[in-house]
Image: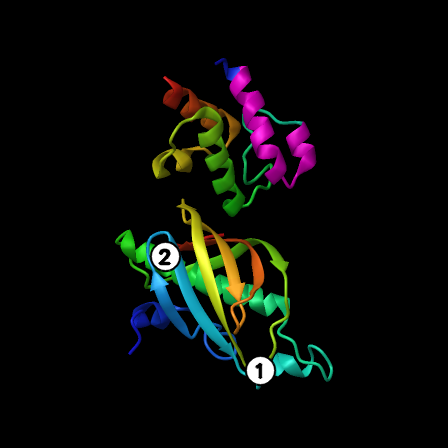
Amino acid sequence: MTKEDIIQKLKRIVEPYVNHTENFNNLTETSDFIKDLEINSANLVDVILDIEDEFNIRIENDDMEQMLNVKKSVEVIQQKLK
Amino acid sequence: MQKYQSILDQLPYQHPFLFVDEITEIDLNSIKGSYFFHNQHDFYKGHFKGFPITPGVILTECAAQIGLVSFGIYLLKMEGKSTKNLNCVMTSTEIEFLKPVFPNETIKVEAEKQYFRFNKLKSSVKLYNSVGELVLKGQISGMISTEKHE
């Protein structure tokens, strides 16, 4: 799976939880889930669980702590898919 | 002394906003508890004028205090975590109300764990009235932990 494929899937996963639509429409690799997209911490858990289902991977506490923006999340997903 | 007194002791509520009398069963997947809605509750004076019915938000709160907070305290304990500095926040509800609950009814709450991951507990809850009829059903989520949260 290419990085672009992962980002496309990630966009679909986060969209329902986004509270800042403009920043979502201008999503970049450095977009921060909490600060830029204004996803709250409870919904961030849902994002992580949806990522687990979508990519069929298991994310641990240490992984989640790193997954604060698009780039970091893609890295963790790629690592798990290896 | 009740069987699950240690859980009740750690609930961060008190009168007039404690809506748990008893935990009757609990394991890693589910919890059952009950509460008696005494007719002296202040909210019956206003909901409604001359026609007291337990407000839906209070039923939801009751379901959450049993199905999320009591349950969460137990699940944290079972993970070997301290429940001393408890933080709990209800974060979402999706509830249907099927029948009214009148003053002086004892209700029963049954909740099943959907997941408890990254400090977020999501439970499906059912609340039954004093004759065993289903009066509320839905899903409630909250963050529960012993650390600081936003």
Q: Is residue B86 magenta?
A: no
* Residue neighbourhood size for the residue with mark 2, other residues' Cα within 10 Å, grouped as few (<14), some (14–19), many (≥20): some
- Residue A24 pos. (x, y %): 64, 31
- The disc numbered 2 marks a residue on which chain? B
Total numbered labels placed on residues in the image = 2
Q: Earlier in the sequence, mark 2 or mark 1?
A: 1
Q: Name the residue rendered at 36%, 57% in the picture.
A: B146
Residue underneath mark 2: B146
- The disc numbered 1 marks a residue on which chain? B
Q: Helix, strand, or loop for circle 1?
A: loop
The reply, left or right, for residue B47 in relation to residue B128 is right
Residue found at the far top of this picture: A2
Residue found at the far right of this picture: B49
Kindly identify the amino acid type of the residue bearing the numbered disc 2.
Answer: Thr
Kindly identify the amino acid type of the residue bearing the numbered disc 1.
Answer: His
- Residue A47 pos. (x, y %): 51, 36
Q: Residue B41, which numbered label? A: 1
Write down the quadrant of residue B68 in the picture.
Answer: bottom left
Return the residue nearer the eye: B128 or B94. Answer: B128
- Residue B102 pos. (x, y %): 61, 77
Q: Is residue A79 above or below residue B25?
A: above
Return the residue nearer the eye: B44 or B112. Answer: B112
**Separation of disc 2 and disc 1 at Cα?**
31 Å
Q: Is residue A82 above or below residue B51?
A: above
Where does the magenta region start and end?
A: A4-25
Q: Name the residue rendered at 28%, 54% in the picture.
A: B78
The chief SS type of the magenta part is helix
